[in-house]
Structures are given as structure tokens and as C-alpha cells.
Amino acid sequence: MIKPITLDPASRRDDSAQGWEKAPRSIGRVVVALSGGVDSAVTAWLLQRRGYAIQPLFMKNWEEDDRQGYCAAAADLHDAEEVCQRLGLGLRTVNLSSEYWDRVFTPFLAAYQAGQTPNPDVLCNQEIKFRIFLDHALALGASHIATGHYARVLQNDDGFHLLKGCDHDKDQSYFLHRLDQSQLGRALFPLGELTKPEVRRLAVGAKLPVHAKKDSTGICFIGEQPFKRFLGRYLAYAPGAIETLEGDVLGQHAGLGYYTLGQRRGLGIGGRQGGTGAPWYVIAKDLPRRALIVAQGHQHPALYARTLVAQDVHWIPQRRFKFPLRCQAKTRYRQTDQPCEVDTDQNRHYYRVRFDEPQWAPAPGQFVVFYEGAECLGGGMIRTQKW
């Protein structure tokens, strides 16, 4: 029997949160990662209502754009302070900008330089929120940290298990798939049993000042940016030809790193010109020749792949898997789970994934994440589409 360690009240739809059991004695002080958004604000409010001893902590992880006006850290800090005033709590802050630069942003740039499409949110959770931030919280005397992720952690005799959030539209287990047993054992996800509309209603009922604040978008902790201009500040790209599969040159691109497989917009080749008259999509990058290969039509066969190879695969459960493994997987956030078979080499350096049905534009640098029903098993970085 799996024992939940997240907030799992019997009447989770009681917007007043009345009738919730008190905080378990096994959980002491909880540091809440307060970002200035509605999800983390409701996280703090729920824990406070349940009787936890909580300490809100705001982390600043980006300083480069403070003078350019793109960084939202100052506004987020102000919002976090207003939330704490409403809850009658003191707010601590920590600056992890140096760690973020070394552990997240530098690998992010290296991946783009190599022609890949990285996912900084995965690295941010692994290296910052649930490593550096967690260590800082433990140093403050906390036993656990809580975040506003839509996910659940369950425990049984086999250890800790990461489960999808109950809100299928907001489930964030994809971004948390690299957490280990120690990190999951210290994590609380109070929103895992709730939907986003329920969270909004709780925020309104609690009179939290951020109840109507829009969800953050863009690069993790950096925010919304004019992407090509932003990336161009850190990487030097050489232009090259945009070609069809037949080798016809349609135009020039600004640099391979600015494009990803399956991209349609921003190619600068006239939208539907030529050929079948259908839109053009990126289907490949020829790095040695600096050529961007495109084809027409969302259903073009070159956009689909039935297989892929993943590296640096991390498994969450403590049990040893038997291969080949039948499970489900997704190659991008919000994709529906896809049935597949996973196999590996003798040393488990690489994992081969064969999907039951061809998948649309799995991109090297992104992550393939494995599931068994509601449980997230782990995942790894996509290296290539072909074995």
C-alpha cells in the first residue's frame, strides 16, 4: 500500500481547507519556495492552514538583465513580500545566480551551440531547486521544502515515487523526472491533488494579492525574452543555407541554434511558397555544412520518428527494471503518453526507445520521460532519432 506524503485531504475540494489533519509530527519546519506567483502563494497558505511551521524563501537566480528591464525578479520579490504580509510571515531571500549560471545556463548555452534544443526547466529543478535550494533550506533547519509544482510524491516499502498531478493540463512530473530518492523524500507538493482553477479560487478566498497574476513563461528564472536577440548576446552563430531534402536552396538562416525540429514560424522563406503550397517545417540540421533542412506539411514523413536513443537516463524507483521494458513515454511537455518499449546496452550507457506509433519531431537535447500509468519512472536526454 502506497502511503502519501503530500497533502492528500479526504475532501480536497473543500476550498476553505477546513477539516484538514494537522501537520505530521515527522515533518518539522518547511521552507516554501516563494516565487511571487499564485501557485507558490497558495502552497504557503495551504501549509500554514494545515499547521506546518513554514519559512518562505525567495531565490534570485538571474542578474544579467537587471538593467535591461527584462528581468522580473524585482517585481516577483515585491509580490512575494506582499503575500508574506498577507500571511503574517517573514520572508528570507537567497541569491543563487552564480550557481544557476554554472549549473543551468552554461549547459543550456553549450546545448544550443551543439545544435540541440535544451530544456532548462529540467536542469533547474535538478540542480537549483532540489539541490542548492534544498541544501540551503536544510541549513536553515528545515526538514522539507515545498514548491508549487503540480505533482505528487508517494511512499511505500519500496521508497519514494513521483506521480503525476491530478490536473492533467498542469501536471509537471515531466520537469521533475531527474529527482532522486533523497530529494523526493524532502519534497512537499501541496498542489498535486488540486486543479489550477481550484488553486485560483483558493487564492481569491484567501485574499492573496497575486490571485490574478498570470503564470510565468519563458526560460526558467530568466523570464520572457526576445529569444533570438537574447541568445545572440551569448553565442556567435554563422548563417547558412535553408535547403529542401532535394538540395534546393530556399534562403538563408541566421544560425542553426535558433531553430528546432518541427519549427514552422520564423524561417523567413515566405511561408507557403513553392512545392505543394503547404507550410515549411524544420526536419533536420546538417551541422558540418551549417544547413537547415526543411520540408512542407505538418504530416511530412521526415518529421516523424518511431525510434530514438536516450543518454544519461535517470530512474526514480529503487527497483531494478528488466529490459526490454514496456511502458509509456513522452518527448515533450503536454504530450499524451505514448506506448513504447525501452531497451538498453549491456552497460546501460544508452537506451533505445521504440514507440508503437511514429512520434512527431522528437528533438535532440529535449528529454524523453517514461511513465507506468500515473507514476513517472524517470527519463533521459534525446541524443538522436535513429539507432
Image (spheres, rainbow, N blue to C red):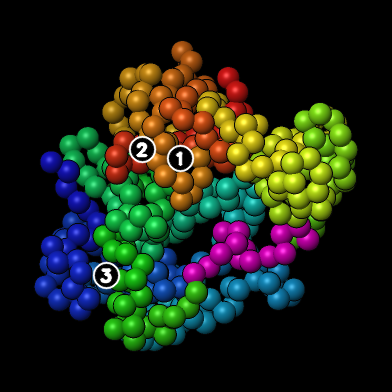
Other-residue count near label 1 (Cα within 10 Å), few / some / many at <14 / 14–19 / ≥20: many
What residue is rendered at 44% in x and 80% in y?
A: 212
Residue 189 visible within the image:
no
* Dots 2, 3 in contact, CB < 8 A: no
Check residue 330 in the rendering and tell me which mark sits there, or answer none. 1
Quadrant of the drawing holding the N terminus? top left
- Alpha-carbon span between mark 2 and mark 1: 8 Å
- Looking at the image, which is closer to me, 140 or 126? 126
Other-residue count near label 3 (Cα within 10 Å), few / some / many at <14 / 14–19 / ≥20: many
- Residue 256 position within the rendered picture, expressed as x and y whole percent measured from the top left: 78, 43
Looking at the image, residue 209 sits to the left or right of residue 309; the answer is left
Per the image, the residue denoted by label 3 is: 47
Element assignment for label 2 = strand
Per the image, the residue denoted by label 2 is: 371
- Alpha-carbon span between mark 1 and mark 3: 32 Å
Element assignment for label 3 = helix
Looking at the image, residue 346 sits to the left or right of residue 238; the answer is left
Q: Nearer the viewer, mark 2 or mark 3?
A: 2
Three-letter code, disc 1: Lys
* Dots 2, 1 in contact, CB < 8 A: yes
Three-letter code, disc 3: Leu
Looking at the image, residue 95 sits to the left or right of residue 18; the answer is right
Q: Quadrant of residue 28?
A: bottom left
Three-letter code, disc 2: Tyr
Residue 327 visible within the image:
yes
Q: Any magenta on residue 312?
A: no
Q: Any magenta on residue 228?
A: yes
Q: Which residues are magenta?
A: 215-229
What residue is rendered at 71% in x and 46% in y?
A: 278
Q: Quadrant of residue 305?
A: top right
What residue is rendered at 40% in x and 80% in y?
A: 211
Q: Earlier in the sequence, mark 1 or mark 3?
A: 3
